[in-house]
């Protein structure tokens, strides 16, 4: 009854959704993607190839740095809570693009959580097994080793030599896992952008919650997948898609999370979803019957943006304003020396801090937005304190 389309990245999940849409449609499905002038963050070519193979009516927009950066300071204003995922920006931009032609768009979200698509699902058992063999004395220095890793140099030097994207970042992350005490702690370290988030605050949080529904007899992979399904998926992925799409009056729908698909996925053992270092095997088999694997079988890229380069370059002034020491002191929430120290280390080139710094900036931007709007008369600090 309304104009319908799909957000297409060219990956397994969105390609599967679009392939099924096109099978059920008598007209070319309208698909949309966002490109990036930075090749290492651009999936638009893959999306266009999948769309052409399926006979879709495809629209792509390549966004340069200036266009993208103009929207960054506006992101906190479309949120009603702090949100740190930097892929909110490209999600917002592709939603704007789609809204020019359709009012409802389908996305492929949910496939990774249901069918084992994240690297942590694939490598966690091997990583945990290896960590248990590392001497405790070495494991205690994991954070220091991670901080010393020249991730950016490794990314450039081995960009086309290894079958993984951003190998330097992967190595830094792996070293940061050395202090893991249990599979659950390993999961927390894999998700967190800061090894000790509470150290950024003036006062430790009065309450904390890091638990997930337990499956004591399940494998480490199944426990991580459940944690993603009830935590990461609704708290990050679906929140991002909802806020970005509704900000432009686009209705986003996620067919892979239809309850029948979820129930089927939960009945499939992890061993049938992940084999030989590859995840999402059921989806891969289904998609291979519709789209040649050469068009979508590639290292997982995600929907990222070059946060580090932006914050050290054209966004530095904006960031400095949000992390102003006087403002941080007046808010009495963050430990000023800890935050400024992290910012200085980031500017000096220390790897692995870009997403954590981005999270701080998004929180500060949201704080300022709440102060300006004075929603319900509540201050940002009181809202945070009740979280």
Image: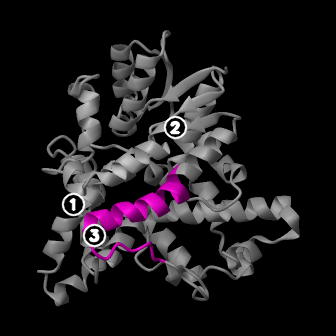
Seen at 33% across and 36% down, the residue is: 12
Judged from the image, the secondary structure of the residue bearing numbered disc 2 is helix
Residue 276 percent across, percent down from the top left? 12, 50
The rendered magenta stretch, by its main secondary structure, is classed as helix
Judged from the image, the secondary structure of the residue bearing numbered disc 3 is loop
Along the line of sight, the residue nearer the viewer: 125 or 154 = 125
Q: Is residue 302 magenta?
A: no
Specify the label residue 123 is tagged with.
1
Specify the label residue 65 is tagged with.
2
Residue 15 occupies which quadrant of the picture? top left
Crowd tier of the residue under label 3, counting other residues whose Cα lies within 10 Å: few below 14, some 14–19, many 20 or above: few
Compared with 150, 68 (above or below) is above
Q: Report the Cα–Cα distance between label 2 and label 1.
A: 34 Å
Judged from the image, the secondary structure of the residue bearing numbered disc 1 is helix
Residue 6 percent across, percent down from the top left? 51, 27
In the rendered structure, which segment of residues is drawn in magenta?
210-237
Mark nearer the N terminus (3 vs 1): 1
Specify the label residue 218 is tagged with.
3
Q: Are marks 2 and 1 in contact (CB under 8 Å)?
A: no
Q: Are marks 2 and 3 in contact (CB under 8 Å)?
A: no
In the picture provided, is 262 more to the left or to the right than 145? right
Seen at 18% across and 89% down, the residue is: 136
């Amino acid at each position: 009854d309304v104009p319908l389309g799909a957000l297409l990245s060219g990956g397994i999940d969105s390609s599967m959704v679009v392939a099924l849409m096109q099978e059920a449609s008598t007209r070319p499905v309208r698909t949309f993607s966002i490109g990036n002038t930075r090749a290492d963050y651009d999936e638009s070519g893959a999306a266009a190839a999948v769309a052409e193979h399926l006979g879709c009516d495809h629209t792509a927009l390549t966004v340069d740095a200036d266009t993208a950066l103009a929207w960054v300071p506006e992101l906190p204003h479309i949120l009603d809570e702090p949100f740190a995922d930097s892929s909110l920006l490209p999600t917002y931009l592709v939603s704007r693009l789609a809204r020019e032609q359709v009012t409802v768009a389908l996305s492929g979200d949910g496939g990774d959580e249901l069918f084992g698509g994240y690297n942590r699902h694939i490598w966690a058992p091997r990583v945990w097994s290896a960590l248990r063999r590392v001497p405790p004395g070495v494991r205690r220095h994991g954070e220091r080793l991670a901080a010393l890793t020249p991730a950016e140099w490794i990314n450039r030097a081995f960009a086309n030599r290894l079958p993984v994207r951003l190998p330097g970042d992967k190595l830094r992350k792996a070293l940061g896992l050395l202090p893991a005490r249990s599979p659950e702690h390993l999961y927390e370290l894999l998700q967190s952008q800061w090894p000790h988030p509470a150290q950024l605050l003036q006062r430790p949080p009065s309450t904390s919650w890091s638990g997930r529904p337990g499956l004591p007899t399940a494998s480490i992979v199944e426990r991580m997948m459940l944690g993603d399904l009830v935590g990461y998926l609704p708290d990050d992925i679906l929140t991002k898609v909802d806020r970005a799409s509704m900000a432009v009056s686009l209705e986003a729908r996620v067919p892979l999370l239809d309850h029948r698909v979820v129930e089927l996925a939960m009945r499939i053992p992890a061993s049938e979803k992940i084999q030989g270092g590859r995840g999402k095997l059921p989806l891969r088999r289904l998609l291979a019957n519709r789209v040649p694997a050469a068009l979508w079988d590639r290292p997982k890229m995600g929907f990222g943006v070059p946060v580090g380069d932006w914050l050290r370059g054209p966004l530095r002034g904006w960031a400095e304003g949000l992390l102003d020491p006087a403002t941080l002191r007046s808010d009495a929430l963050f430990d000023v020396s800890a935050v400024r120290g992290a910012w200085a280390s980031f500017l000096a080139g220390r790897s692995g801090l870009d997403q954590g710094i981005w999270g701080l900036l998004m929180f500060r931007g949201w704080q300022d937005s709440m102060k300006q709007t004075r929603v319900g008369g509540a201050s940002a600090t009181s809202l945070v304190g009740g979280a």
